[in-house]
Image: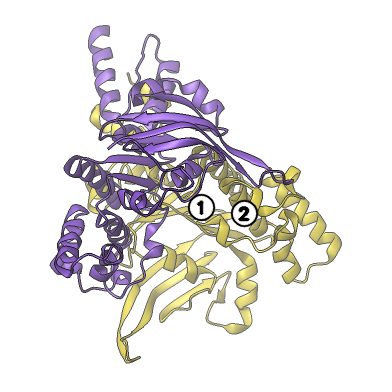
Amino acid sequence: MTIEVKDLKYIYSPDMPGETTALDGVSFDVTEPSIIGIIGHTGSGKSTLLQHLNGLIKPTSGEIYIDGECITDEKKNLTDVRRKIGLVFQYPEHQLFEETVAKDVAFGPKNLGLEEEDIDRRVRRALYMVGLDYDEVADVSSFELSGGMKRRAAIAGVIAMEPAILMLDEPMAGLDPQAHRDMLALIKKVQRDMKLIILIVSHNMADVAELSDRVLVMSKGRIIMDDGPHEIFKRYDELSAMGLSVPPAAEIAQKISKKVKGFESNPLSIRELADDIEEFRRTKR
Amino acid sequence: MAYINVEDLVLEFSKYDENGKPLEPKRALDGVSLSIEKGSFTAIVGMNGSGKSTLAKCLNGLLLPTAGTVTVNGMDTKDGGHIWDIRSNIGMVFQNPDNQLVSSIVEDDVAFGPENLGVEPPEIRKRVDEALKKVDMYDHKDKAAHMLSGGQKQRIAIAGAVAMKPSCIVFDEPTAMLDPAGRSKVMDIIEELNKEGITVVLITHFMEEAAEADRILVMQDGRIIGDKTPRELFADEKYIHEAGLELPPVIELRDMLGMDKKILSAEELAANI
């Protein structure tokens, strides 16, 4: 599965007083299964980009190819594309509506017109993938679940569509620390086991640093950085000028290097920073 | 007597089956007692479903106790005659800014609260301007509320609470939906309001935000299982994990390096390298 985005432009309310360029020439390729973090401050175009990728919005100009197929073609029937691309919105648990968890997860596959047997198989697999026990939750109302479990059930509903590309908009927002850790582990597992391309939009830089193989930074409708997480989060000053931040580990490293002469570290996690500090203490002695 | 007193508070939500037959109620708060002093800054942490938001809604009588009492400045929330006094004393700011704005123009939104209190128009004007300046949104007073960013909307929601001149504001995860710049701005405003004498109760999942408080309450299964200062709480790693919480990043680093448990900030930590 590949994604190719070519010079994508999108203008809201063209020729109207509120005319706004939301995407201003966005191009990037994804050629192999991986996790791609997308960061940028509110209004930078992240969500607009996601909505283009599964065909919810048509661009003003530019093209998107999914597996070589142009999905921005006017005549293209988008039903097949939407099946390949799952989009999990912010707070997806607000969209749970069925009487039981199993029925909710089955809703998408049912609409694909699949056989009962196949639907059941997909529901079981999807619940397994998100770490929910089928026998425990299948017949329970989704409103009885805890916050973290609700969100996982909602994601299972998208996974049951067996997408090749999964897009997650702020999947960790509002979760307690334990549910947060579980969600990070879940995303990694789903990516590995299902060999997906996962695009994650998040304001939480520690999460983006931990999950991403590659990070896209958006500002004013453009991608202005596209690199590995280490390279991106090195650019502390540029990111803060945009109202973004770096992972807490990198921020702490900055503060320490201001106080401790000769100390330099460019960590993504607290573990990496601790290792650098220990190394520094050893060489100083 | 403390400003807010909560005694043996129990709160149950009624539940019904498909045919409307009552089921066993769900107990969201199970015997909570605490007192909050005027001018203090209290953080409440705990897992999703531990009862934090339910407790918050009991403080200004949005929810009334199934058993036990909540008093604000000596007034019982169950006493219907005091409920408006209590609500004008305790402001609330919730997680989602989009659910809290009632008017299409920024200054109208901030004026909504004092208008409903029956404040005189010249005084409303004064309060709205002051409140907007306090949250650094005065320049946006004529703007359409829906054109603002999440962080700006949240600041308007705070201004709306401030314009009611409350003595206490309860913040229920006010930064959960904001970007990093929006988050730090909102936290700065909360600290500033507290310095000016407003009692602050802050519910949060971010431990680095809780670390700013004088006192942290830890909730689990509808009870308060811990009442500690940040220094005490973050010295006890085992307790943090048992309560389903996490350490703030600086503390995690401190413990990995085996440094003194008294260290709370990056600067203190740097001094020990």
Which residue has dot 1 on it?
B174
* Amino acid on which disc 2 is placed: Ile
Q: Chain of mark 1?
A: B
Please give left or right for residue A91 compared with residue B158 in the image: left
Q: Position of residue A38 (x, y in %)?
A: 42, 36
Q: Nearer the viewer, residue A28 or B82?
A: A28
**In the image, what residue occupies the spot 31% across and 38% down?**
A67
- Is any atom of residue B87 visible in this view? yes
Whether residue A253 is situated above or below residue B100 in the rendered picture:
above
Q: Position of residue B268 (x, y in %)?
A: 40, 26
Whether residue A123 is situated above or below residue A199 in the rendered picture:
below
* Amino acid on which disc 1 is placed: Pro
Please give left or right for residue B7 compared with residue A61 in the image: left
Please give left or right for residue A195 compared with residue A72 in the image: left
What's the colour of chain A in the image? purple
Which residue has dot 2 on it?
B158
Q: Quadrant of residue A147?
A: bottom left
Q: Quadrant of residue B32?
A: bottom left
Circle 2: element type: helix
Q: Are marks 1 and 2 in contact (CB under 8 Å)?
A: yes
Q: What quarter of the picture does the N terminus of chain A occupy?
A: top left
